[in-house]
Structure formats: structure tokens, C-alpha cells
Image (cartoon, rainbow, N blue to C red):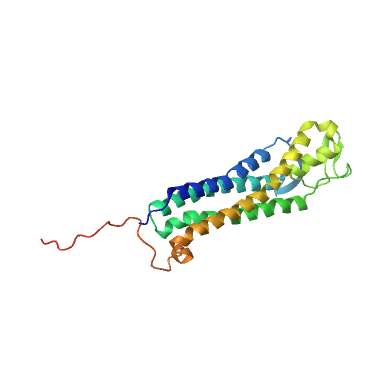
Amino acid sequence: MEARSPMITIAVSVAALVLGVPVAILAIMFNSNWIPHIILGSKTFSTGPGKTTTIDFGILTGPNDAVFAGALVAIASTLLFIIGLLLIRHFTRHNGFGWFVFGSALVNLLSQIGCCAAVYIFKNKYPVAISTDQIRYVDGQYTTGGNLYTKEAWACSMNALYANREGDWADRACSRFGIARALTIPLVACAVFTLGMAYWQMRPQGGFGWLFGRNDKIVAAYKPKGEYIGLKG
């Protein structure tokens, strides 16, 4: 197997770590904020003769789940990328291990695009309240008229409308949730660069032809160093 420079392997691995881990960790940190447990509405269903079931609707967590999922995918795909890089550069040229590099980078990019799209769709669909007519404080509890809010929208609404009542948590959570949402964009950008590095590492192996097994550059993970010929029993 052709010798590969360990310095290039180290450089690419460090670049993958820088692109895949710090922003993801920041997103997780800014996405983790305390907000009070709030019931925004409820609906009662008939479940049989004389029986009913009531379902409560609380703060929507979809955007926060998307940020958290995207960050975890970024970290996991980075680890798989580095493992695959070490294998194909120094131990084997079997195309199956190439998917550790290119496949993880591709899945990461698609995941980051999906998560980024999700958080901004939620932001547009569930905006921040701008008037106390939208969120009323009546008899010691908030009523929203059936409207739902995400964690970010609720925190920002409380900060804008009831800051004196709610205190500092609303301002802190509103700001941090906004930063976590914005970090989904750098996560997409980092995923694009990582996919570019993955393709760069595929080219010396034979590119997509090697990756999909369409040429003669696929070799076994382990191959004999030589053959014994002319042996007689």
C-alpha cells in the first residue's frame, strides 16, 4: 500500500475537528436554558361512555430539538470522518471504509440543512408576541387564546411584555435561544467544507468510481505481501 504522509492526516483531522466540534458545542450550550413550565392550552376528548381525556399543550420544543440533533450529528460525523480518514490513508483502501469519510460528511450536511430549515420555519410560524392582547395575564396565569409558542418565542415575549414580572431569565433565555438558532447557519457552512475535504480525500483513491465500486481500484482490507511460487510437495 502506498505510504501516505501522517502530517496531512493530522492536518485534515484537526481541520475536521475545528469545523465539526466547537460550533456544535456552542450550539448545545446556548440552546440549554431554563424556562418555566407553562400550559398554553388544553383539549378534552371523549374516550368512551362517560369518560374523557384532557391533553395539555405546552411550550413547543421543536426548534430546540432540531438544534440539539444537528449538533450531535456534527460531532458524531466528525468522529466517523476521522476514523475513516485514518483507515483509508494508512491501513486499507477498501471502498467500504471510504463511506466513513464521505458518507458521514454527506449525512452531516443534509442533517444540518434540515435542522437549519426547521428552526427558521418554526420561527416564522410561531412569532414573538408584540402585544399584551396576544398574551394576557389573568388570575395569576397566562392565557394565549389558543396560540402556541416556541421556547424562544415565549422567552422573548415575556421579556418584551412582562419583563418586570418575569425577571432576568426571560432576557437571558431570549438572547441565548437566538444565538443557538443562528449557529445552525455556521453548522451548515462547516458541513459544506467538511464534505469538500471528504471529496478531496476520495480523489486519490479513485473518486466516486472507487467509492461506489465501479473500477478496479478496490482492494481487500488485508492483502498478502507476496506469493510463494515454485514450491514442491
In this view of the protein, can residue 57 be seen by the observer?
no
Q: Give the percent coordinates (x, y) of residue 135.
A: 85, 42
| Quarter of the figure with residue 17 | top right
| Quarter of the figure with residue 33 | top right
Q: Nearer the viewer, residue 43 or 94?
A: 94
Residue 63 relative to residue 4: left or right: right
Q: Nearer the viewer, residue 20 or 123?
A: 20
Q: Nearer the viewer, residue 14 or 104?
A: 14
Residue located 61% across and 51% down the image: 190
Is residue 41 shown above or below 215? above
Residue located 77% across and 39% down the image: 155
**In which quadrant of the rendered image does the C terminus lie?**
bottom left
Residue 104 relative to residue 138: left or right: left
Residue located 23% across and 60% down the image: 227
Q: Give the percent coordinates (x, y) of residue 16.
A: 54, 48
Is residue 192 shown above or below 40? below
Q: Give the percent coordinates (x, y) of residue 116.
A: 67, 52
Is residue 181 shown above or below 32? below
In this view of the protein, can residue 45 be seen by the observer?
yes
Please, which residue is most extreme toward the left here? Answer: 233
User: How many marks on residues?
Assistant: 0
Residue located 67% across and 45% down the image: 64
Q: Give the percent coordinates (x, y) of residue 165.
A: 84, 31
**In which quadrant of the rendered image does the N terminus lie?**
bottom left
